[in-house]
């Protein structure tokens, strides 16, 4: 297992470097003068003073060649200096880390809710395939996969903040404000987990060891969970890494929708405002996080599945 | 992320459902024909009548009008052309590219195949919304259909490549491939004339299952304003526009939402039906 971990971690620098190059170069293909755009938004003048523009370009480090700009940026990032935001005019790290904390809270909460709802739903549906409960849960999960975050979020706001005003529609900080964003974000992974767990559990329940457990006289509940559901969990955990990556993407929509001050919203505003330091640092951090989540999920799946573990050794 | 989950066995339909299946199928085909005809109507989604703002349903405007007095039904139909048409274009590009890349990766050696799989695993994990943000940043903060296309295609081909790779690697050990090799067929001929036709059904099913995913991603990016700009009636963009008025005119939000979700459900249903019909006996022939 350690060897596997090392191999995966060795691949990580490659991902980071590739992501850094991509994140740095792509915004520079725009052919737009970033310094000019920033100066325009700061002063409100269509044709700012060329001297001021040149000074600003020099201060942003936008006057050198791409290679010089990249090495300067990458060197600074390696020492922990993420640069200064063009629009907020404060260090990026001061904006990014708190926002990342908010986003992680949101996504982890959504993942937990999804697991708590989706996994039992899938296991119970598998108990009697084709039964009434199974049909209801399957219909729910099909719908859950087909409804995107922006539709679900809007409908939830329409229902619980407009028609029956019981929950706040925007903001972040109180538990009540977290309910709608978390539910919106959790729906898709919950539905997908339910489908996956159902299929796997049905498969597992047909195996010999389940028949043995049944003939030993173990109670239904124990057979279902300890002998059936547990095996099904490995496939879900290996997917949860993907979920986390996807959730970070989905959280862009949810954070914009509910005005949550997370990294998705920060990135969204930064992209529209041509705030390159924030775009670069934010995307880099999120992509690295998604890759790390993938590795973590793989290890977690191994920890849960003794058969796969011995195969890796 | 995708909805590519096999859900196990099929429900036995009730007798009255089974009796209805044939007429239902005929009805569905008829409905599809009518829809295609409606799609071809010359409609103007920006024709407005400011005296008719937020009008309720009437004979003239069956689904009412929006904040500028534009017919909501007309906008939904034109939006269907954009949303569905665009999704189909994306799917064709991603499907062809992914299938070709996956086939190629399935024919190269084991080490290269492993490397391919690692790369795909990382690419699949990067959400399309984030790519969308990068692409819009690259387009200088001025999004449109082209930046949207690029955003979805950059990682959109990876699920197809992954699936094709897995299937091709499995097919390669089959006897018919061995037989084709023995009579001296070239690798290209075996791949395109023997293996790929055998994989057409699972790949087609996957195409249908990906449709919903791409449609929702496209609509989501448009919703964030990272796609076609108003007054283009893309469904996601329409929903975003309608949000400002949802207190007084919730139908401006609900109708595009229903259009997106309904389309996604229907195509996913077709995909699941295709997938279920795939016989999975030990010979595993498709």
Image (cartoon, coloured by chain):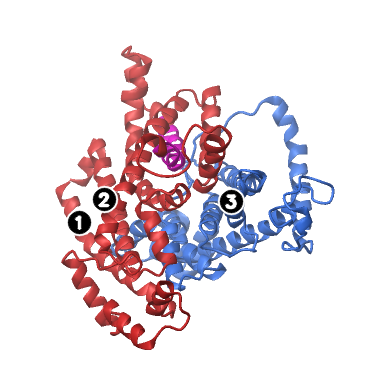
Residue A287 found in image quarter: bottom left
- Give the dominant element type of the magenta stretch: helix, strand or loop: helix
Q: Residue furthest right?
A: B59
- Does B110 sit left or right of B90 as displayed? left
Residue A137 x %, y %: 51, 30
- Does A135 sit left or right of B165 as displayed? right
Question: Which of B88/A166 is in front?
Answer: A166
Please determine if labels 1 and 2 lie on a single subunit.
yes
The reply to whether the C-beta atoms of the residues labelled 1 and 2 are less than 8 Å apart is yes
Query: Label 3: chain?
Result: B
Q: Counting other residues with Cα less than 10 Å from the Cα at mark 1, is it few (<14), some (14-19), or many (20 or more)?
A: some
> Disc 2 designates what residue?
A295
Res A142 seen here: no
> Disc 3 designates what residue?
B244
Magenta residues?
A178-201
Circle 3: element type? helix
Please determine if labels 1 and 3 lie on a single subunit.
no
Residue at x 76% of width, y 45% of height:
B56
Q: Is residue A154 above or below residue B44?
A: above
Where does the C terminus of chain A fall, quadrant-wise?
top left
Query: Label 1: chain?
Result: A
């Amino acid at each position: 297992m350690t060897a596997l971990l090392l191999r995966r971690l060795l691949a990580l620098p490659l991902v980071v470097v590739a992501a850094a190059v991509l994140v740095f170069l792509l915004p520079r293909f725009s052919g737009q003068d970033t310094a000019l755009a920033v100066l325009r938004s700061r002063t409100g003048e269509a044709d700012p003073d060329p001297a001021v523009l040149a000074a600003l370009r020099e201060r942003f480090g936008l006057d050198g060649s791409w290679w010089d700009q990249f090495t300067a940026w990458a060197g600074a990032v390696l020492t922990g200096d993420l640069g200064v935001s063009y629009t907020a005019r404060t260090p990026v790290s001061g904006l990014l880390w708190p926002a990342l904390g908010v986003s992680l809270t949101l996504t982890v909460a959504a993942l937990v809710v999804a697991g708590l709802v989706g996994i039992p739903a899938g296991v119970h549906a598998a108990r009697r395939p084709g039964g009434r409960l199974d049909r209801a849960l399957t219909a729910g999960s099909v719908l859950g996969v087909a409804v995107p975050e922006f539709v679900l979020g809007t409908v939830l706001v329409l229902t619980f903040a407009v028609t029956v005003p019981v929950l706040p529609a925007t903001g972040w900080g109180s538990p009540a404000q977290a309910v709608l964003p978390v539910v919106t974000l959790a729906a898709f992974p919950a539905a997908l987990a339910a489908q996956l767990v159902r299929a796997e559990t049905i498969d597992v329940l047909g195996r010999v060891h389940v028949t043995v457990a049944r003939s030993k006289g173990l109670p239904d509940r124990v057979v279902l969970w300890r002998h059936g559901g547990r095996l099904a969990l490995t496939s879900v955990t290996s997917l949860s890494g993907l979920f986390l990556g996807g959730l970070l993407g989905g959280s862009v929509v949810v954070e914009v929708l509910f005005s949550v001050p997370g990294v998705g919203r920060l990135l969204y505003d930064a992209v529209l405002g041509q705030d390159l330091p924030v775009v670069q640092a934010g995307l880099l951090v999120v992509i690295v996080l998604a890759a790390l989540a993938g590795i973590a999920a793989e290890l977690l799946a191994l920890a849960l599945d003794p058969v796969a573990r011995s195969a890796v050794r | 992320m995708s909805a590519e989950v096999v859900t196990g066995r099929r429900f036995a339909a009730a007798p009255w459902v089974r009796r209805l299946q044939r007429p239902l199928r005929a009805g569905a085909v008829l409905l599809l024909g009518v829809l295609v005809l409606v799609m071809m109507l010359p409609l103007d989604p920006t024709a407005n009548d400011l005296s008719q703002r937020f009008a309720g349903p009437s004979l003239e405007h069956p689904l009412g009008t929006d904040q500028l007095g534009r017919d909501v039904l007309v906008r939904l139909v034109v939006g269907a052309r954009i949303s569905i048409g665009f999704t189909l274009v994306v799917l064709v590009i991603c499907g062809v590219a992914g299938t070709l890349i996956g086939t190629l990766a399935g024919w190269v050696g084991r080490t290269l195949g492993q490397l391919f799989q690692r790369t795909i695993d990382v690419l699949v994990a990067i959400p399309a919304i984030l790519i969308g943000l990068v692409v819009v940043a690259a387009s200088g903060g001025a999004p449109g259909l082209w930046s949207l296309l690029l955003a979805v295609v950059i990682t959109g081909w990876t699920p197809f490549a992954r699936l094709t790779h897995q299937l091709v690697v499995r097919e390669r050990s089959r006897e018919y491939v061995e037989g084709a090799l023995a009579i001296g067929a070239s690798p290209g001929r075996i791949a395109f004339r023997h293996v790929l036709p055998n994989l057409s059904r699972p790949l087609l099913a996957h195409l249908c299952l990906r449709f919903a995913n791409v449609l929702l991603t496209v609509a989501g990016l448009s919703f964030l304003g990272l796609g076609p700009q108003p007054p283009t009636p893309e469904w996601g963009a329409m929903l975003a526009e309608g949000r400002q008025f949802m207190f007084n005119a919730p139908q401006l939000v609900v109708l595009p939402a229903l259009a997106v979700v309904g389309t996604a459900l229907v195509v996913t249903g077709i995909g699941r039906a295709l997938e279920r019909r795939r016989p999975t006996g030990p010979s595993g022939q498709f």
